[in-house]
Amino acid sequence: MSTVQGLGQTPLMWSTVEARRLFSLRREPPLESDEIVTAFRDGVVTKRSDRRTEGFTQALKETGYQHVAAGDLVVHSMDGFAGAIGVADSDGKMSPVANIYKVSGDARYFAYTLRSLALSGFVASLAKGIRERSTSFDDATLASVELPWPPIHEQRRIADFLDDRVARIDQIITARQHQIRLLYRALASDVAGLVASDGKDWITGSLRRFARSCDSLRVPLNSEERAKRRGKYPYFGASGVIDHVDDYLFDGPKVLVSEDGANLLLRSTAIAFVADGQYWVNNHAHILEPFDGAHDFWAARIEALDISPWVTGSAQPKLTIDAAMALPMSAPAQVDTRRALGRQVVDARAAVEKRAWALEKSGTLLQEYKQSLITAAVTGELDVTTAGSGIPG
């Protein structure tokens, strides 16, 4: 048997070859019709417009952009360590941080092999760091990496096997993620049904009728200040805990409501939630103390409200304290009823979180299984001609 650094042993009949002998770097100018192609960290190399367009830094000038053809092997020099390595499925153009190769052999097999090296930590161990959470996996670094070289027909067989199995596993993982989204969507609907009403024995009024603001007690700490004050106490921002510090401002429950940020309109995470225990709050969350002590009810009641008419600003949406305190509210006239509804919300959320955790755990195990399957296949440990078809759920 041969041994490949970062992968382990491979069959005796396989050889090992330096990447420089297998990969030929391409540098071709883009065509006028080329769309932007991106190498994602999950190994997909596709047109950006087919995946997503938000969350990217848009270049003012496309200096150094290069043509990529479907079937080319792409290694992202900055994000390759995290798995941004794959075979392009489309023609297009890519930024100069992408190294584009023609491959002697099956490009899919070598994409799987390089991703195994990346996700095992091997790539990060030999690459030069250039920014936080990234490393430089440039052409010169890749050139000296030794890779297994099975016969070409075995490369194709392994790649075909992995294309099938990885696609099936990814479908299951996607289904798990969809189930989680549906669980939380149903929870939001159920909670709104519990706490948002204006029926008999309910009273109405603006939020200031039911709670007071404690915003004057907020103290923001910038990242440098927090770095010097690391500790055990949660440090809350607009959407939850963002850090931990060495002291606290509050001891006991408060309702926190996001003051600013795109999430006020997107609502991808909660904008109103209860903080309890000992903790610190910055100036991106309003702090409310309900007069009746029914914190869980009021967090759920605010969360169930469409606040968009009270949000100002387009570039940076903002819910001022005056706007927050003017939000129209309804609540059961009896405080005990509010507290009982709050407990129902907490119980319902706990049940959903338990089910979501099980689904997330299943997804994590499938990701781990997928990676171990890829490594076993590309090293020859798994004979893909006799491998079973079962995938753990």
Image (cartoon, helix red, strand yellow):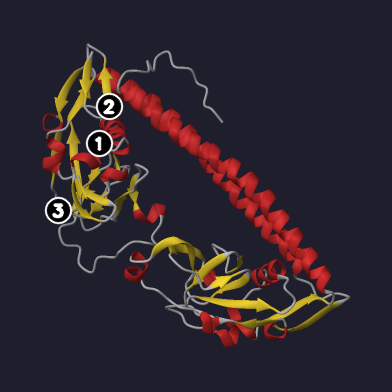
Mark closest to the chain's N terminus, 1 or 2: 2
- Can the viewer see residue 337 in this picture? yes
Badge 3 marks a residue whose secondary structure is loop
Q: Which residue bears the numbered disc 3?
A: 29
Frontmost residue, 42 versus 37:
42
Mark closest to the chain's N terminus, 3 or 2: 2
Point out residue 322 in the picture as x, y percentages from the top left corner: 58, 88
Point out residue 171 in the picture as x, y percentages from the top left corner: 51, 38
Q: Which residue bears the numbered disc 2?
A: 7
- Would residue 294 appear left or right of 282 to someone viewing this image? right
Q: Amino acid at mark 1?
A: Phe
Badge 2 marks a residue whose secondary structure is loop
Residue beneath the point at 61% across and 46% down: 356
Residue that sits furthest to the right in the current view: 200
What separation in Å lies between label 1 and label 2 (alpha carbons)? Answer: 9 Å
**Is residue 87 shown above or below 226?**
above
Q: Determine the image quadrant of residue 49.
A: bottom left
